[in-house]
Amino acid sequence: MTRDKIPGRETETTSLEALNLKSLLDACNRCGFCQDVCPTYRHSRNELEVARGRIRLIRLVLEGKYDFKSEPDAAKMVDSCLLCKACTVNCPASVQTDQIVLQARQRVREEKGFSFFHRVVYQGLLTSRQRLNMVNAMLRLYERSGLRRIVDRQVLEKASGRISHLASLVPAHCEQPAVCDLSFQVQEKENAVYKVGLFVGCATKLYGRSVIQAAVSYLQSRGCSVHIPEIGCCGGPQHNAGDERSARELARKTVDRIFSQDFDFIVSDCSTCVHTLLQYTKYFPADDPVQDVLRGYQNRIMDLNTFILEKLGPDASLKPLKVRATYHDPCHAVRGIGVREAPRNLLKSIPDLELAEMERADSCCGGAGSYCFTHPDMSARILKEKTQNILAQVPDVVLTSCPACTLQLQAGLRQQKMSIPVKHPVELLARSAGL
C-alpha cells in the first residue's frame, strides 16, 4: 500500500467507538521506540508491522482514506500483530497499542466477517468440550497408527518453511484428557487449607494431561481441596480475534459455572486464561449484576505458580532434582498479569535444579494462541530465534506457563531435531515431591 488517500473515502467516521479509538490513536507521538521491541518488525523491517505503522494505518481507516473490507493489506497488518504487549509496556507515551489493535480487529470482523479458521476453531471447536475430546481422539489415533512417524519422516525431514512448521505443531504426545477421568473432577478434602477451582484451558484439555495430573496431585499434597469445574473456553481467543459477541457469551457461561461455586481461589496453569478471567469486568456493562460477582473474585484469580508460591509457601518435602532448566516467559504472564519471578522462585526451591536464563526470555515465541496457525511464516521466523536462545543454554528441559507456548516451543525444538521436553513448572515440582 503506497496511497495515503483514496478518492471518495474522505467521510469521517463518527461512531462513539471510533471516537474512543481516535483518542487512543492520538496518544502516539511517532517516536519509534516500539521498533526496538516489536517481534514482527524485528523480523520483517516493515513499518506497517510495528505499533507506529499500525496506528497510522488504523488512523487512515478512521479518516476514511482506507477501509478494511476492500483493502486486504490493511486488515492483514491489523491481524499480524501478536498482541504480545511489548510495545505497550515500553512506550514512553503509554500508548495502548494492544487495545487499539483489538478495537480495529472488531471493526475488521464487522466489515469482512469471520474467516473459515475462526468459524471452525474459535466458534466451533473451542466452544465444545465434546469437540475437543473428538480432536484429542483423532490426534491419539494419528500418533498410535504410525501415521505421525511417516509424516515426520516425509515432511519434517524433507520439507521446509510453512509446511514443515505446520506439521511440527501437532502435539508431541497426546493422551486421553485427564478431565475425562471422573476421579479428577472433584476431590473433597476435610479441613482443606483452600478450596481451589482449577481452571483448565482448552489447550491443556486437548494435550496437557500431565500438567493437570501434576497440578491436582501437588495441590492435594499441600492440603488443598481441588475441583475441576465443567467449563468451556474462557473467551480469550475470541476476544483477541475481535469476536466480542462470542467472547461475552463464553464469559457469561464461565461466570455461571465457576464463579458461583464459592471457591477460595480460582487458579490456572494457563497465563492467558488467568489474564482473560481478570479482564471479565471489561466484558460487561457497568450496571450488569455480574459485576458484583466478578469484583468479589478479582483478588482470588491467580496463576498456578503464584498461588503455590504466595499462598502455600515453602515445601520442605521437595527432593533433589539434578536437572538444567531454562524458562520462557509467556506474554500474558510477564506483561499481562505481571508474573515473572514466581515460576523462577518455585524452580529455585527445588534442590539441585539449575536454572539457566536464556537471552530474551520474555520475548514472544510466535505462538500467540493460534497465531502459529494463522501466520505460520512470521511465527516460524520468530520461533527460530527463540529456539536458538533456548539451545544456547543447553538445557535438559524447557519450562513455560502457557500451553500455546508449550506447543510452539515443542515445534521449534522438533524442527531442530532436538528431543528436549517442554513442561510446566508444576510438573517438576510434583516430580521433586515424589508424586
Image (cartoon, rainbow, N blue to C red):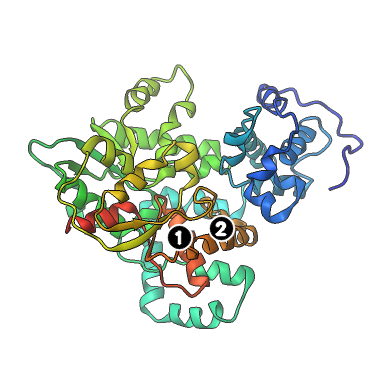
Q: Residues within 10 Å of mark 1 (few under 14, many from 20)?
A: many
Q: Which mark is residue 373?
A: none
- Which amino acid type corresponds to the residue marked 1 in the rendered image? Leu
Residue 250 x %, y %: 43, 39
SS class of the residue under badge 1? helix
SS class of the residue under badge 2? helix
Disc 2 target residue: 372
Residue 133 x %, y %: 35, 59
Q: Are marks 1 and 2 in contact (CB under 8 Å)?
A: yes
For the C terminus, the image quarter is: bottom left
Residue 253 x %, y %: 38, 36
Indicate the quadrant where residue 92 lies.
top right
Q: Residues within 10 Å of mark 2 (few under 14, many from 20)?
A: many
Which residue, as the protein is rendered here, is positioned at the far top? 287
Q: Is residue 93 above or below residue 226?
A: above
Q: Residue at x 15, y 51 (%)?
A: 317
- Which amino acid type corresponds to the residue marked 2 in the rendered image? Cys
Indicate the quadrant where residue 15 lies.
top right
Query: From this viewpoint, is residue 169 visible?
Result: no
Disc 1 target residue: 407
Which residue, as the protein is rendered here, is positioned at the far right? 7
Residue 153 x %, y %: 50, 83
Indicate the quadrant where residue 213 lies.
bottom left
Query: From this viewpoint, is residue 182 visible?
Result: yes
Disc nearer the start of the sequence (1/2): 2
Residue 127 versus residue 411: which sits nearer the camera? 411
Q: Residue at x 38, y 41 (%)?
A: 341
Residue 421 versus residue 239: which sits nearer the camera? 421
Total tally of numbered discs in the picture: 2
